[in-house]
Image (tube, rainbow, N blue to C red):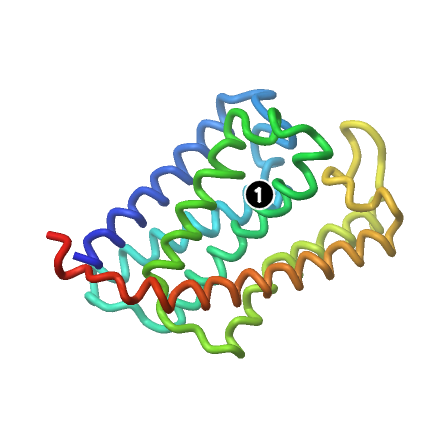
Amino acid sequence: MKKKVQIMVNVLLAVLVFTIWILSFFLWRGDAALSVNGWEDLKFFTVQSNLLVGIVAVVWLITFAVTRAVPHWLSVLKYVSAVAVFVTFSVVLLFLGPFYGYKWMYSGSNLYFHLLIPIFAIAEEAIFGEDVSFKESFFAALPPALYGVGYLANCLANGIGEGYATNDWYGFLTWGYGGGAAFFVVICALAWGMGLALRALQKPARKIPWEVRK
């Protein structure tokens, strides 16, 4: 029963992620804050983290269908992808929501990328996630760390810019490069903390009596 539910959740994640991304890519225009059409939307960590969840869900489904098992490296990747959208969820809730307004941060495609898909992915990892060691928990900080390096490097190389041409689309450099770097360090630490929280949530979830839920 447990695996059947997990399969359905991964199908839901894959369908939601790629359906919303395709609609946003081709059709939805100006439907939400920090949302653009075409390949340019890949500059946002929101889109990258959600696509990571979708890709990992597809890989998980294919791997389980072929081998009827999930290798440990894939379980770790599942964990990392869940933490990545956990970061998206938290940054929107605590920083971008007050800055841009929650109405725009949870409208259109953002309703799915900022709220619904992260909730599904976090819940799946908390309930079905496999054991991830303390050392492996540090991988949770890797996506925001890589994104932060790329974000700051792009601003240094091409300038911050202004208006629609800005390379500081999240406003992280409002307080200068030092402030931006510090903000990304905080986000990486937050991601690691979220990863530890997910590990802690997995323990009580494993006590769910799936065998009686038929």
Depth order, front residue of 38/199: 199
**Position of 152 compared to 77: left or right?**
right
The answer to whether residue 61 is above or below residue 99 is: below
The answer to whether residue 42 is above or below residue 27 is: below
Residue 170, position as x, y percentages in the image: 72, 40
Residue at 28%, 66% in the rendered image: 207
Q: Is residue 149 visible?
A: no
Residue 28, position as x, y percentages in the image: 51, 22
The answer to whether residue 211 is above or below residue 106 is: below
* Secondary structure category for the residue under label 1: helix
Residue at 39%, 65% in the rendered image: 202
In the rendered image, which quarter is residue 39 located in? top right
Depth order, front residue of 101/44: 101
Indicate the quadrant containing the N terminus: top left, top right, bottom left or bottom right.
bottom left
Residue at 62%, 29% in the rendered image: 102
Q: Label 1 amino acid?
A: Thr
Residue at 59%, 41% in the rendered image: 42
Residue at image mark 1: 46
